Amino acid sequence: MKSTTTRRKFLKVSAGALAAPFIVPAAVLGKEGAVPPSERVTIGCIGVGGRGRANLQSVVGNSQAQVVAICDVDAAHRKDALQAVGLKAESGYGDFRELLGRDDIDAVVVSTPDHWHALISIAAAEAGKDIYCEKPLASSIAEGRALVKAVETHERILQCGTQRRSVAEWRRGCELVRNGRIGKLRKVEIGVTNQFAIRGGYTGLEASESPPEGFNYDMWLGPAPLAPYTPARCHFNFRWILDYSPGYITDWGAHFLDIAQWAQGADDSGPTEVEAQDVGFRTEGIYNAPESFRIRYTYADGVEVVMTATSDTSLWGVKFVGEEGSVSLRGNVKGSVLDVQPAHLAKTRIAPDEIHLYKSDDHRGNFIDCVKSRRPTAVPAEAGQRTATVCHLGTLATLLGRRLRWDPATERFLDDDEANGMLARKMRDPWKLKTV
């Protein structure tokens, strides 16, 4: 079947072709008294389109690190990234296993679509590499637990990419909640957008065609079910297809639910019940992730976390409601807003003997520092797994349409065989989930 997709259109849609100017700091090139190459953390970047581009730029900008290898199933992404960091073609790979086989790589940055996160990260741990993995940590609860075990078994450092923990306003807001400044916490309100940000003008109804030259579509699918190729399916737009990701539940939701977990001190736990209401799906086409929803989580202490998809931009973010006040957080790492009510609580000092949360002001930089020091990161594997689990619980509630009871200690549903059967995703041969 002849392809009807031009390379130019394909790269435009992917939003990750490194088309914008890519500046390599002089320090990274060994100038201006930079850290000697022998003392830098050597990095292999796996996935350099979209989010991977931002991660690559950040790592290149860190004088403590040196990118030595690039992997991407799209030859154009791979070539552009290699040129951007001054590497030769032999340092580029289309198969992550070849990159992981290099002995000169200390750590990897995994920025692939969600359905690849756990398998690649587990393989990296087994290969003795430390891991920066984009959120969500895994595309199923069972995959995430297997990754946590692999990291522990092989004594690896892992940072999950929920980077709001490395922003001062979000840390301050969570400290106010943890230290009781708004009284006993009663409810957490989370708002995410309800409009799929589909790139390239696609509808999800496009006909199938041949993949463009240089794009290994079979490898892109990996463990996901075999499906006909259409450019509407790949790169950024994978997020709206359940075979790869459940939409904004693990996109915006992963960031905001991570903050809800952090402020509650639930990095080793989670909710005990979950229920979804007002759930809406598209009725035709390949985009089948939940587009509208109201997901209610209940924790053992009675705290409710309610995440709603809404077009009201004033509700986007996280609001903690206590008996004596509230803390609201909005924005992202480039511009965050903390609002505390009553206002005088914002100036409250956190005493030395009170709870002080992990301090990091640079999420990717924190990862590099921890690779060198071997100290835990801002979002280690267990915390990343627990946040991803909350996301997946919400997704399962939207799909099953009933209240689910959850045991965070055993990571199993209570009296629900059907739900427990959905803890892991089926994988297409030859890909399999390794358990330790």
Image: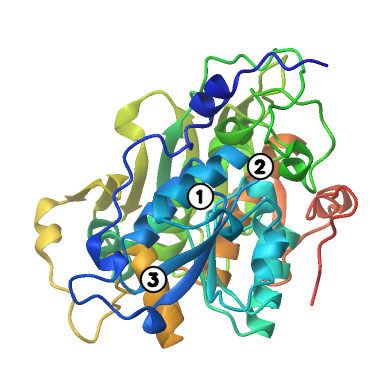
Position of 39 with respect to 25 (left or right) is right
Residue, disc 3: 65
Q: Residues within 10 Å of mark 3 (few under 14, many from 20)?
A: many
- Closest to the camera, between mark 2 and mark 1, is 1
Position of 358 with respect to 425 (left or right) is left
Whole-angstrom CA distance, mark 1 to mark 3, is 27 Å
Q: Nearer the viewer, residue 182 or 54?
A: 54
Residue, disc 2: 395
Q: Quadrant of the C terminus?
A: bottom right
Disc 2 and disc 1 in contact, CB within 8 angstroms: no
- The answer to whether residue 202 is above or below residue 251 is above
Residue 309 numbered tag: none
Q: Residue at x 72, y 49 (%)?
A: 404
Q: Nearer the viewer, residue 301 or 434?
A: 434
Whole-angstrom CA distance, mark 2 to mark 1, is 12 Å
Picture coordinates of residue 61 (x, y %)?
Answer: 31, 60
Q: Quadrant of residue 292?
A: top right
Residue 254 numbered tag: 1
Q: Is residue 208 at least partly visible in the picture?
A: yes
Label 2 sits on what residue type?
A: Thr
Q: Quadrant of the N terminus?
A: top right
Whole-angstrom CA distance, mark 2 to mark 3, is 37 Å
Q: Residue at x 40, y 83 (%)?
A: 38
Picture coordinates of residue 84 (x, y %)?
Answer: 40, 49
Picture coordinates of residue 76 (x, y %)?
Answer: 56, 38
